[in-house]
Amino acid sequence: MSFQWNDCNGSFHPDSAVDFLPEEQLRALQLQRLRATVMRAYDNVELMQKRMDDIGIKPDDLRSLDDIRRLPFTQKIDLRDTYPYGLFAVPMSEVVRLHASSGTTGKPIVVGYTHADMETWKNVIVRSLAATGLHRGDILQNAYGYGLFTGGLGLHYGAEALGAAVIPISGGNSDRQIMIMRDFGVTAISCTPSYFIHLIEHGASMGVDLKKLPLRVGVFGAEPWSEEMRCYIQREANIQAFDIYGLSEIIGPGVGIECRCQNGIHIFEDHFLFEILDAETGEPVPDGEEGELVLTTLSKQAMPIIRYRTHDITRVIPTRCDCGRSIRRIARISRRSDDMLIIRGVNVFPSQIEAALLKVEQTLPHYQIIVRRDRDMDDMEIRIEVTADVFSDRVSEIEKIAARLSHAVESTTGIRAKISLVEPHTIQRSEGKAKRVLDLRKLDAPKH
Ligand code: DLL
């Protein structure tokens, strides 16, 4: 196989060769796998067969990748309605792993993996970690939660297969995290970005400066985070921070990751076909424009998923990456369509607010957005931690920072927010996915 590989300084991992497949070969492989996936779903999953029969399409009708648009979408509700195993395409005797995601309401969704699926998962994680420059000999502190969440166990086996020494520490117990990070000579960490910023300050409170440790790579994901947050992390811990993307319904972590160029998430297109669609119309948006990411699995056996509406908003980056990979990139997932807050009729996303806040000096990346309704008027309050020295300044200085923050938020979102500056360590820390928005309007709503 010939390919152009240009991953500055990184050692090349053979599993990554597919990342550099010539475009036509990649598309041919996708089409072949798409047809097999649709066939598998049609033959083995009642709901899929019924949906396809209803619109009169058969697996054999798929002649090109564009024909995917003729297939019906899958939504999270479909996983709930068929709870627990209704979308499985294999008998239970072939399933070797189950994970579940609790979601916010009601029953969890359940996902299953065959032995072959576990191999696929391992493969995409090896390629993910290799893309960040990790290799045999690295020591990875895996602080994603182990358990029903896919983060911990999902990364685990791929990291081992890469040849890294994996510390399966899971999330929480920050004292122990810092001690192990220091004593074990940890070179890489994986966790949510919000937990990592907590670890940075927790280290400081224990007298451990992460900048001085051998730690050099962070593999962060499972929640939205901004470029400003990346700058903060890289500066405060002196590491390179990479964005890893995934979701339980599709496989877990490892749908895509940034390479060392840190300029967009490469999707492992040989295993996952992506579309970017207008969330309202379901039609494709032009290349480079924002839309909803819709994913189809191309090799999953236990639970083939066709055209899954992720609600994650992104855009394709149409140019070829400097690393030489031919698999395409998407921009970081800055928000979910269902994260949107409507405040006084204006649409606002928490990630926009985060980016605006962190641009102002002396702010810390710990904040909370509280939305209330007072006499039919929406009110947004932003509580944000600022460095301790701010509070030793004159009142006028404190007011100046608050005014700068208020201006930054207003010019980005169009909404005037009440800014409350709070001391470091005031806002609750997360060990997994951070919950930054408290929308009290939902609680205040009149009950009928
Ligand atoms: O969060 C899988 C994962 C684990 C990904 C570890 C990365 C690292 P779920 O719990 O099913 O799975 O949540 C999936 O989380 O639809 C996105 O909304 C969000 N998400 C995941 N990765 C990112 C990311 C795991 N890098 C949902 N940036 C997805 C922004 C992300 N959002």
Image (spheres, grey):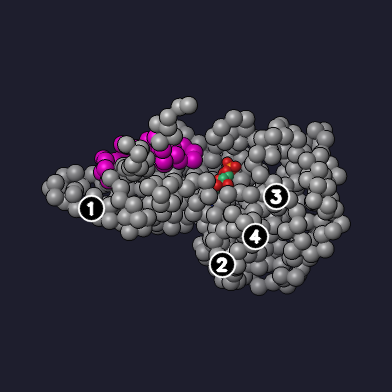
Packing grade of label 2 (10 A; few <14, some 14-19, many >=20) is some
The residue pinned by badge 3 equals: 73
The residue indicated by pointer 2 is 288
Instruction: Answer whether residue 152 is visible to the viewer in this image.
Output: yes
In the rendered image of this protein, does residue 252 appear above or below residue 286? above
Residue at 70% x, 49% y is 73
Count of labels in the image = 4
Q: Which residue is mark 1?
A: 403
Q: CA distance from mark 2 to mark 3?
A: 22 Å
**Gap in angstroms between the C-alphas marked 3 and 1:** 46 Å
Of pointers 4 and 1, the one earlier in the residue sequence: 4
Q: Is residue 206 left or right of residue 43?
A: left
Mark 4–mark 2 distance (CA, rounded to whole Å): 14 Å
Residue 323, located in which quarter of the rendered image?
bottom right
Mark 2: secondary structure: loop
The residue wearing badge 4 is: 283
Q: Earlier in the sequence, mark 2 or mark 1?
A: 2
Q: At x 55% / y 65%, what residue is drawn? A: 289
Q: Residue at x 45, y 27 (%)?
A: 447
Q: Are marks 4 and 2 in contact (CB under 8 Å)?
A: no
Tell me where residue 390 appears, x and y as whole percent: 20, 47
In reply to whether residue 422 is colored magenta, the answer given is yes
Q: Nearer the viewer, residue 233 or 301?
A: 301
Q: Secondary structure at mark 3?
A: loop
Nearest to the eye among marks 2 and 3: give it: 3
Q: Which residues are magenta?
A: 419-440
Amino acid type assigned to the residue bearing label 2 in the image: Gly
